[in-house]
Image (tube, rainbow, N blue to C red):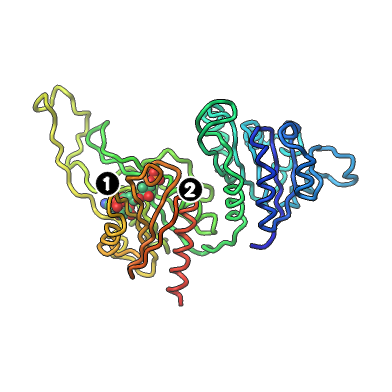
Amino acid sequence: MEPRRILLAITGGIAAYKVPELVRSLGRAGHDVSCAMTASATRFVSPLALQTLTGAPVRQDLFDPSEEGEIDHIRLADWADLVIVAPATANVLGRMCHGLADDLVSAVLLATRAPILVAPAMNVNMWSHPATRANLETLAQRGVRRVGPGAGELACGWEGEGRMAEPEEIAAEAELLLGSKTLEGETVLVTAGGTSEPIDAVRSITNRSSGKMGFALAEEAACRGARVILVAGVTALATPAGVERQDVSSALEMREAVLGRLEDASIVIKAAAVADFRPEVREESKIKKESLESASGITLRLVTNPDILAEVCARKGDRLVVGFAAESENVVPAARRKIERKGCDLMVANDISRSDAGFGVDTNAVYLLTPDGEVEELPLSSKRVVAAHVLDRVEKLRSERRG
Ligand code: PMT
């Protein structure tokens, strides 16, 4: 990667103590790093330390008399190829959201045309507050990228989400953002989340898929310059920046959406957890407890859902098709049988019996299988990193195919 100019905007949270390590990581990658700080950030990390590490003056003042004749915040905003806000407090997220600009950091964030990456860090209750959630949603819609936060013990004494992502993770995300647009010209159709198979007006059969794996793939593909169509099943996740989303609920709706968008797609990735069965009959109203045949229970007859992945593979043409296999035992042999049966170009197999992989969690540990018998094991990583590996592999298959 060519060296690029990165502006680190540091706001006032205890996680600011990790910023020198982030400066080192970015510097090791050869980037030219400059820092701008809010007044409260200077209480957690010394401007002198950052000046020593970057070899550049650390900006703090919106009206700095030493920068004669120049408007410092505009110069900094124009200079940066990427702005990283780390730590990003709830306060700065709110200020960004509302376009406030009464200190150097917020003025730069309003003036820059460079991509912005935020690394939030705050108390778990501040993180889950509806105001913070709404601000993040707005910023995501404007294309602001986010890394973290992670969960764990927080400096304030609470446990939960709110820990700033580790410096290496932020640096890796920055590389992705600055990376080349290797999927430009491609249309990637991704499915994510679980399906919900209705029993009656209020009840359904669903599964534990959160959508995180599929959303990470969609975000990563958009980052690489692809047009991304995300067919989302049951999930609470916000739409990643630059992604077209179509919401569905049942497997039948997902099938209709996928087959309806297939014509546009050059790459299809099926990370959704599709129900194999659905109740044969969907009662229009709520089944009343009193109407059950016997006090001991009710019998639901399930019928098989169509296999969307197999149908996509049957009409594959020149497309590259990636399936996921959720396995709880004999992961690789079971996934091998699936790739043979369904006919996709790559199968991503995850061991869903692990507590740190598969459904619901932020991490995954997968095997990548190809139809010619090759198996590659990827170590436990964040779903975003797994998504990056999967897309690297897709790009490799694409160039092999093109010869
Ligand atoms: O959403 P997360 O919480 O992040 O969890 C991620 C995940 C575990 C859901 C994901 O990594 C994963 O494994 N997705 C596939 C889940 C699944 O349905 O696996 P399967 O082995 O039952 O199906 C194999 C493949 O066929 C999948 O690509 C699936 O989308 C597809 N399929 C399955 C059944 C069906 N009727 N139609 C399909 O297209």
Q: Which disc, if any, is residue 6?
A: none
158, 120: nearer the viewer: 158
- Residue at coordinates 34% horizontally, 66% vertically from top-left? 316
Q: Residue 93: percent from the left, percent from the top? A: 62, 35
Question: Mark 1 or mark 2, which is nearer to you?
Answer: 2
Disc 2 marks which amino acid?
Ser
Q: CA distance from mark 1 to mark 2?
A: 25 Å
Kindly state the secondary structure of the residue where label 1 is placed: loop
Residue nearest the viewer, comparing 11 with 143: 11
SS at mark 2? Answer: strand
* Residue tagged 2: 382
Q: Position of residue 287 (x, y in %)?
A: 19, 28
Q: Is mark 1 within 8 Å of ligand 1?
A: yes
Q: Is residue 292 above or below residue 121?
A: above
The residue at 53%/26% (across/down) is: 158
Indicate the position of residue 30 as horizontal and vertical percent values.
Answer: 69, 58
Neighbour tally class for label 2: few under 14, some 14-19, many 20 plus, Cα within 10 Å = some
**Residue extending furthest bottom?**
403
Task: Tell me if residue 256 can be seen.
Answer: no
Residue furthest left in the image: 294
* Residue at the image point whose x is 70% and y is 39% from the top: 10
Q: Residues within 10 Å of mark 1 (few under 14, many from 20)?
A: many
Determine whether the beta carbon of the residue marked 2 sits less than 8 angstroms from the nearest atom of ligand 1: no
Residue beneath disc 1: 275
Label 1 is placed on what type of residue? Ala
Quadrant assignment, res 372: bottom left
Could you say which is closer to the camera, residue 111 or residue 328? 328
385 lies left or right of 358: right
The quarter holding residue 362 reads top left
**Image height check: is 115 above or below 130?**
below
